[in-house]
Image (tube, rainbow, N blue to C red):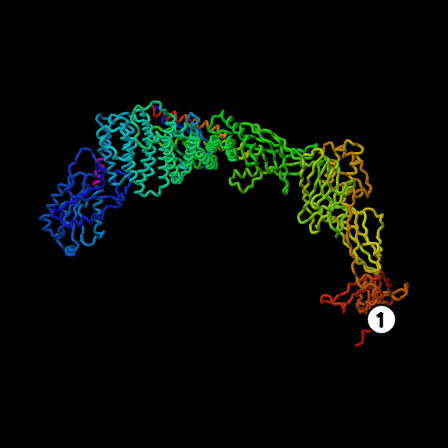
Amino acid sequence: MAPNLRLNAVAFISPQNHPILIRTFSKPDETAIKYHYIAHTSLDVIEERVSTKSSDCYLGLLYSMEDVAIYGYITPLKVKIVIALALSDSVVRDMEINMIFKALHMAYYSAISNPFLTLEESSGHDSSRSLLAGSPKWKNLRSRIDEIARIVGNSSGASTGG
Amino acid sequence: MSSTKKSIIVSYSATPSFITSSSWTQILQTLQSQLPLRNIHWKSSSRTSIRTIHQLDVSLVNLDNVRDELASQVPTTLLERPLLNIYVITCENNDLEAYRATVKRQIKEWHTTVSPRKNQEWLILHVVRADTRVQSGAFFTLKGSVLDKVRADFNTEKRERCVQLVWSPGGTKPAAWAEFLNKLRDGILSAFESAVIQREDEVRRSEGQRQMPGWNFCTFFILKESLATSFEGMTVYDDALVVYEELEVSFEQVLKEKNLSWFGPLITPTSNDDSAPLLTISKKPYRGLILANNISVFDFRIYLLSRQCELLAKAGRLTEVCQKVGVFLSNFGRRLREAESEMAPYFVESWIYSSALSVVDQCDTWASNADVDAKRPAFNAGKAELLEFARNQLDMLGIEKEFLPKKPPFTNALLSSTHRNQKSSSTESISNTQLSAAVTNQESFYDLYIHTTNRAIDLYAKSGRRKFALKLHGSLAALDLHRGQLETTPTRLESALTTYNSLPAHYAPHKWISLESVMLARALETHDIANKSKDREWIHILLAFFKTYAETLGADLLMPEESKVDYVSQLVGALSKAVSELTTDLSHPDHPAFKIRVSSSAIPDETRDGSYLEVSVHNSLPCSIPITEVSVVLAGRDSERFRFTFPGESLAPGKTDFKLFCPIPCHGSFLLDSSEVRMDRLLLQWSHRKTIHNTKSSSARSIAKDNHVLVRVPQDLLAFDIRLRQPPLVALGAPPSLLVAVSTGRNEVSSASLKLSAPSITFDCEDVTVFTKGLTQPDSTPDHILLRDLPKDKEVELLIPHSDASTMHSIKVTIEVNYTTVAEPSINRNLRLTRVITTTLPVSVNVEDFFRGNRLFSKFIVSTISHQHVRISDARLEPPDESSGLKILACSSSKRGIITVTPAQPAQFLFQINSDGPVREALSLDITYRMLQHAEVEFVVEEAVECAIKETPSWKIHRIPLISKLIKMLETDASWVEMYGISGELHIAGSPGSDDILQDPVDAMLQAHKRPSALAGPWHEIKIPVDVPVMNIVAAARIQISAAKDTALYAGQPISATLSVHSSFHWGTSANDKERKYVMQYDVEEMVKEWLVSGKKRGTFIATDEGTFSVPLTLVALHHGEFVLPKVMVNALPLADVDTMGSMAIPNTETYQVHGAEKVLISPRGGRSTFVLGMGST
């Protein structure tokens, strides 16, 4: 049985709704845009959720598509994290998803703790740019996310497939 | 089926005669009008919280009509049987005999049938007529009431099961029913609870036997479901849902254990399965199938879902219905695909499509009945999601049928894993007519696609999910593009282009560059396919696309790395072609693909006028860009603008350095105003002077901080320049003019045109005079002066008269010069200079006049008004013309040399004026002066440099820098002034650090410098008009002591004297008029310490021209000493005959004391004297 939790994409979105990082794990490059769309549209749903539900960081299932389920998370500082999970027949427990989000949150947290992150760019024309998607700055965060995605795939495969 | 009857059953019973009576019918009607029961609080022992039932329908049936025996063993709802049985008795309350005789027996009979029933409660209702009640209310009814009796007989338990109803046929008071209704509620609840507890026990038991052989999931399901239907009947939907959820979980578990013996195959497709409305339970006999153990998983799951959704809908949770269906469709759709080969082609798509649409319709029907307004946006969003889901099926079908291209955005819905490699074996076709039509007909497919998408967009828009709507708009545009491509219809492409053009604006504000760039790339593609000419619009799209590229450095372009460069360079090629075909300039502001960085100082060109500015341009695009020019504009004070340009050819990716040239000789600090990269007709512009107020966030503020870039342009001393000076001759009162000094520097100027302007002052260029010798009069129009053929190193001085500016301290003159040099005839240098010239003179002059008879002495005091020393070589008082007969004598000789006026020490000049009569015309005071530093010392330095250059011609090129350097050194230190003033030697304080090549010449020259000839060099002259004041009467008063000159005078001795006043009208208006007389008054000053004056000390007299008035006086000196004589004041009295302005006119008078310098020696007197003074007559 294939691992029932497979991360297809992770998106970090700034409090101003600017994309920070969109990382896709699916093979063909063409589908990347799908996850960009997903990240973008999730903002609408997150907005709905946040307005009704106040305190909780974890926003639960935002919506689902044919093959992916989109989950959302909002940090206390309003950074939004969106993950796209490959759909499977098994029941996905919120606990597990929440744990993935916590790990992603920590990854982001430690990535922005780097004091040299924005310093380098500040002499440039626009310092806010460094926090945007596609910036080469997020090398570290990227590798952390990849690591998380790998662990998520492995561990749940081991626990439920066994 | 039982589930259709949802209300609680309550049975009633009574004597047959009563049941049929009309009064019972009335009671029953009234009772029914009190129903349904409201606000029931069910406090269950097995549940933690109180469930509130807002409304509960109760149907009252005759006990005889209730079928006691169950038709089948299949457990159905607990509400199938009555929860409460009521027996109605009607006897009078005190009619105990009747009770004993008949009623008791009837009750007993009923009680025995009812009480053993499980999970049913009973209630005895005693109906009492309201009118009989009064009588029965008597006290001391020893026997007790019927009700008490009934209680005693039947109600043995604690629970009160007897209730009395006071019945009045006319009015129905709700209060009368309250107790009965309470009892009804209690009874129903307790019966229901015990039934639930029992059923739950059964369920638990059955669940516990799961592992045992013979256990059947379907049976268990039916059993447990009955619980849910019961809850549903009681309208506690949440509990019902919980039951279904638990059932779903156990179903999952069963599936996981792969124990599917209770189920049929995954799906047994019937012809309408794919198009039947999903949530309609009645479409198949689901329960029957379950009981028969041959329901397919497909049907089973649909049944489960439908029941849940129905409950959710009843609970008003329609949004959850949509979500649940969405999740179910995607989950189960996947399962179905695994078994796709057994089904009709496109079965799954059709099923999902039809189901999603039918659920949307179903939800709308539910919503129209229920009030879900509070959740309207979310509900709409849920429906929209379902519609989008349906639309995605169309995507799949379309790609499969090749109606749609297999590329994004259509492939977004495509499952990455599934590939339909095995063709369906089934020969059946899908039953959804819409779809089957669409699958065969391309046009109708597109129509369906657009229709469904538009529905979804509409709902998304209503729910406020703008971003979803945008996505769908994008897919519609993609469809248009595709269709336009197929059919080559320009209208479709046009609409696709419009959509693609409008979409980036929605993604740009939040920097979703990836999506923005995709939209732009699509727009470009559409443009290409439509074969539209590459016009301005196309260029704008392309530039926007480059912008997205530059902002992410191409990282988010969502296309393969290697094709990016090709793609972009191809676009760049097309751009340069398109740009060259434009007819007018197209400017585009602030494109991020290029960044221009300007060095902080410019370098002057040593060989010609102008300076270079180093600029580095960073090109973020991956290929080189053909350009035609790079330019930077620097802004100075006022509106000066200097443009530095470089005719570049291409910008390679990355950094390129350029050296921009500006031919205009400017210097100072400038602000970087804007920069520009030109590509034929395309101008990419950047403004570097953003105003701070339009930035809002803190990051933006930090941008604004380093926004202002200062560029220093050093002065080029050999450049063409224009200075303003005060003219060498300033005549006050005459029209002013200023001296314009045009220095050509290194240039051989072929032509130069000057235009001067200053606020509120007009320059009269036509009356320009050339001050420098050897030049012809320039061509001039009223506002231009045109100079031609000026040689190198020449300074041309032009005197330009202008309008009066005496109210201002200084004039700020803007000079616009246009000049071309012989060396570079093609470059027309347009210089705009602002020069300030002070109009005030460096000296101020005060005059004091002294009249002495026919002579006038004028004393002029010349003082400097600045801190500078002023050297005055000469001061003359000139008569207005020779014929005036004035004789002016200067008091000091002309050999006096140069006078230095310092702030502390003014200079005085005294002139004597002799005239024949009053002077009407103004004299003019001519002062020849120069400022010590600005004129004299500078001249000295220039002379010295000139001298030095003669000795060493190699310094010639350094002449101007040398002079300016020396002057600068003089300006920085004032210590040379004193030494120069005394000795004339110029000692410039050493300038350490100036280690350039000029150091040696400077030192050599300074040492060689000797005292210059004093008068050499430029002198300025001012002409100040001086009016000689009119003095009507000049009186000379004199006290003359009559005694001989050598007679000794003693203190106390009376001395006779004569007071005489000589009057002259020489300087007045009535000069030489012998007839003119003035009445005057004289007054001898009291000098009480020195003199006693006796005689007519005060009096009036008539003054005539050249007449003398005398009066004797006697003076007595009070003590010895040498005293001046008392002064005599002489005043004219007001004229009697001339009356000016209603007041008396007093002729002006100046009096001087002839004896003012005389002193009288009074000797002391020995001995004692007695004086008797007459004190006047009494």
When asked about the image quadrant of residue B619, the answer is: top right
Disc tally is 1
Q: Residues within 10 Å of mark 1 (few under 14, many from 20)?
A: few
Q: Nearer the viewer, residue B1117 or B910?
A: B910
Q: Is residue B350 magenta?
A: no
In the image, residue B251 above or below residue B635: above
**Residue B566 rendering spot, x and y as whole percentages:** 51, 26
Report the magenta residues as a range.
B191-199
Point out the image quarter for the N terminus of chain B.
Answer: top left
Q: Main secondary structure of the magenta part?
A: helix
In the image, residue B369 above or below residue B844: above
Q: Please name the residue that numbered disc 1 is placed on.
A: B1170
Point out the image quarter for the C terminus of chain B.
Answer: bottom right
Describe the element under mark 1 as helix, strand or loop. loop
Compared across the picture, whether B581 is left or right of B66 comes to: right
**Residue B786 rendering spot, x and y as whole percentages:** 72, 41
Q: Nearer the viewer, residue B1103 or B653?
A: B653
Mark yes or no: residue B53 visible. Answer: yes
**Residue A129 rendering spot, x and y as whole percentages:** 51, 34
Q: Nearer the viewer, residue B1088 or A10?
A: A10
